[in-house]
Image (tube, grey):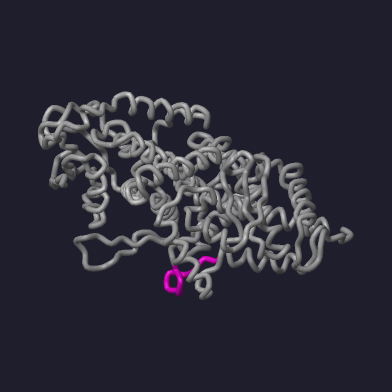
Amino acid sequence: MTKREPLSQGPDWNFELLDRYDQAIKEIAVDEFGLDCYPNQIEIIASEQMLDAYASVGMPISYPHWSFGKQFIIQEEQYRKGAQGLAYEIVINSDPCISYLMEENSMPLQGLVIAHACYGHNSFFKGNYLFRQWTSADSIVDYLVFAKNYVRRCEERYGVEAVEDMFDACHALRDFGVSRYHRPPQLSIAEELARQRERDEYEWQRHDEIWSTVPKASTKGKGPKAAGSVEESQENLLYFLEKCSPKLAGWQREIIRIVRKMGQYFYPQGQTKVMNEGWATFWHYTILNRMYDKGLVDDGFMIEVLASHSNVIAQRGFDERGYGGFNPYALGFAMFMDIKRICEDPTDEDRHWFPDIAGTPWLPVLDFAMRNYKDESFIRQYLSPRLIRHFHLFALSDHEGKEYLEVDSIHNEAGYRRVRQLLSDQYNRDGQLPDLQITGFDQDGDRTLTVQHRMHRNRPLSGDADVVLNHLRRLWGFDVRLESVNQDGEVLAEQMYEAS
C-alpha cells in the first residue's frame, strides 16, 4: 500500500502550497498522461473581481460598457442572497494560459481548479482544431489591452454616450459577426497599432475645413457612391458594415472591428461547450484520483473534491426545480468516461457500435476525439446506447398539424441512432441562429441594403429580430430591406426598416 505523505492537511492554503500542488499535478497531467499545455500563469482574485470578470463575458481585461455594470449588479445581488454561487475559476485561452482562482477557495478546491483549468481547459485550448484555427492565444491579452485603451480614448474624444451607442448596436449584431468558413489573417499588436495610425492619418488627410462649412444636402437618394457592391452573399454582417457602411467614421469602424474580433474569439467556445467542460472535468477527476492513489492527498481532501465534483456533474430531471436543459459538464464528462470504458472494458454492444476503438488504448482515442471534433460531431460520433439509456433519452415529435405529441424514437437500434442524431442537431450553430445574409445594396440609387433571412423549416424570425435589424439600419445609415426566403430561394415576405 502506498505510504501517505499528503502535501497538506486542512482547508488553508498559501502560495507555497499552491506551487507544490501545481508541480504535483503537472507531473501527473503532463509527464504521466502526456497532456500538451501552454505554460500556466495563476492569478488569485477576490470574489468581487470574479463577479466583475463574470459580468465582462469572462474577461477580466475588457473594454467598459454599461451592460457589464448591469450584469455585475444583478449577479452580485444574487450572490449575496445565496441564490447563485460563483465558479471557482476563470481561464483565458492565451499563451501563457491565465487561470484566475478565487482567494476564498479552500486548498482542496484550489487543487481541483488547478487540475481543471490549468491542465484540462489549457490542453483543450491548445489541442482542439477550432481553437487552433480561429484564435491566436499568443496575442489575445495584448489585443484586449489595446481595445480597452482605444475605447477609453474614444470616450474622451467623442463622449461616453456616443461610444456606448456604438457598442449597443454592435453587441446586438455580435452573433452575426463571425466568419465560419474563412479566417482573416491575424495581426500582431504592433501591426494593429500601425494599421490604426494609418487609418487615423487617412481620415485626417481627407478632412477639409472648407467642405465642412458647406450646408448639408439631403442624403436620401443623392448620396455619394458607396464603397463597393456585394459580389456574393455576406454572412458576416459586422465585417460588411466595417468595410462598406457609407456613414461611419474611422473610430466607429474600429469599434465594430473590436466587437467582431471578440465574437470571433468566442466562436470556438460556443461550438465546444460540452467537449471543453467535459474534458476539463474528466481530467480533474482523473488527476486528483491519481494523486490520492499516490498518497499525495488525504481522505478529507478527496471528500471535499468529490462533493464539489458531484455538484458540477449533476443533471436535473426535466420536472425538477432549476432544470435548464442538458448540463454540459454532465454530458461531456459522461461521454469521455464512457469512451475510456469502451476502450478498457467493452461489451458486445460496444464492439458492435464502436468497432474501431473498443479494446484499444484509451489515451490516444481520447486525445484524437478532443483534437478533431466539436460538440455536434462529437455527440454524433461517440454517444453510446449505454449513455442514452443512462440519461433516459428518447424522442418526442410535435408536429404543427397534430394536436398530440408522438413518441418518435425509443431504445432500439433505430431509436438510438435517431436520438443521437437529434441531440447532435441541437448543438448545431446553424440551427440555433437565424441565417441572415447581406445579398446586395442599391449602389447608384438610395443605397437600400438588402438582407435575406433564409428560413429553416419555414420558421419566421422572432419579435426580437426587429431590434437587431434596427441596429443594423443605424450602422448602415440608410434603409434596410429584409426578405424572408424559403429553401428554394423564393421570397415569401418583405419588410422595410427605414432610416430616420
Q: Residue 253: image x %, image y %?
A: 34, 36
Magenta stretch, main secondary structure, is loop
Q: Which of 271 and 403 lies nearest the eye of the viewer?
A: 271
Residue 291 magenta-drawn?
Answer: no
Give the quadrant of the N terminus. bottom right
Q: Which of 203 and 85 lies nearest the eye of the viewer?
A: 203
In the drawing, does residue 139 fall left or right of residue 377? right
Q: Which of 119 and 313 lies nearest the eye of the viewer?
A: 119
User: Does the rendering let one see residue 348?
Assistant: no
Q: Residue 347: image x %, image y %?
A: 61, 53
Q: Residue 69: image x %, image y %?
A: 44, 59
- Give the residue drawn at x 80%, y 65%: 298
Residue 86, compared with residue 483, is above or below; it is below
Residue 311, compared with residue 49, is above or below; it is below
Quarter where residue 255 is shown? top left
In the drawing, does residue 447 fall left or right of residue 320? left
User: Does the rendering let one see residue 219?
Assistant: yes
Residue 497, compared with residue 203, is above or below; it is below
- Give the residue drawn at x 14%, y 46%: 498
Task: Say how many tags the image has.
Answer: 0
Q: Residue 326: image x %, image y %?
A: 46, 61
- Give the residue drawn at x 11%, y 37%: 218
Residue 319 magenta-drawn?
Answer: yes
Give the magenta part as a residue range: 314-323
In the drawing, does residue 221 fall left or right of residue 8? left
Quarter where residue 355 is shown? top right
- Give the residue drawn at x 15%, y 47%: 500
